[in-house]
Image (spheres, grey):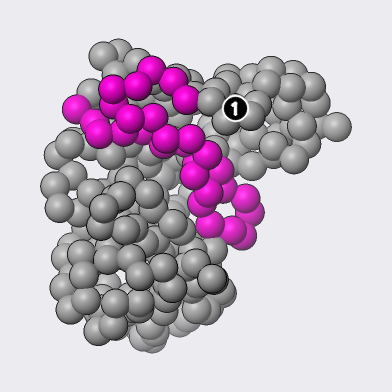
Amino acid sequence: NAGVTQTPKFRVLKTGQSMTLLCAQDMNHEYMYWYRQDPGMGLRLIHYSVGEGTTAKGEVPDGYNVSRLKKQNFLLGLESAAPSQTSVYFCASSPRTRLYEQYFGPGTRLTVT
Amino acid sequence: KQEVTQIPAALSVPEGENLVLNCSFTDSAIYNLQWFRQDPGKGLTSLLLIQSSQREQTSGRLNASLDKSSGRSTLYIAASQPGDSATYLCAVLPVSSGSARQLTFGSGTQLTVLP
């Protein structure tokens, strides 16, 4: 039981490049979340999903897109990376019956130059 | 809008000392409050969860209290050890979070316990 995994762990992009971050969970959780964490700030929600095929915007969605084609995977895309998107990205998942239990992945450190 | 504040941002203590981390939140309409631990390069691990109807929770050397009416929580760590060195994050689940059940996080307290 791997829990929540994230790929890749580190990435450096140039401004304007695109990439996709992959989150996978093997706990059969319905809810999945993407957060970003910046120095001196708490985690902020980018997008979330309440089930396969559904996504919704969080607090800071601009510049990102997401997809949840399979229940166990939640993808975060950056179409045209900007330096302001330099951050650590965390994925989390929750079971629908216990939404206060959020299980976090190890994070992806992204640098945009 | 719910805001969560943690003071101090960083704390350094000698091993064996008892310490208190503080968390305050602006809107008392919450379902629960959690304390997380974050180690460098790793994800968050939930330490304690206090439901809105509860006053405190204990786990080993950790004790978390909640005063919802004043918008405050404390995390008490007894007999601190170097292994307790980490960033501690406080997060609330606001009633206003709707279907997202979005946690609102503080910016954390970076704790260093010196041997």
* Residue at 38% over, 17% down: B55
The verdict on residue B34 being magenta is yes
Q: Secondary structure at mark 1?
A: strand
What is the magenta segment's predominant secondary structure? strand
Q: Residue B91 falls in which quadrant of the image?
A: top left
Determine if residue A57 is in view. Answer: yes
Per the image, the residue denoted by label 1 is: B62
Q: Residue furthest right?
A: B115
Mark 1 surroundings within 10 Å by alpha-carbon count, few (fewer than 14), some (14 through 19), many (20 or more)? some
Residue B26 in percent (x, y) is at 26, 25
Please tell me which residue lies in front, A85 or A60.
A60
* Residue at 33% over, 65% down: A29
Please tell me which residue lies in front, B35 or B23.
B35
Indicate the amino acid at tag 1.
Answer: Leu
Query: Which region of the structure is painted magenta?
Result: B29-57
Using residue B112 as the reference point, say whether residue B62 is left or right of it: left
The verdict on residue B86 being magenta is no
Task: Reply above or below: A30 against B34.
Answer: below
* Residue at 56% over, 74% down: A10
Residue A69 in percent (x, y) is at 25, 84
Task: Reply above or below: B46 against B34.
Answer: below
For disc 1, the chain is: B
Task: Reply above or below: A38 against B72.
Answer: below
Q: Residue A68 falls in which quadrant of the image?
A: bottom left
* Residue at 39% over, 30% down: B50
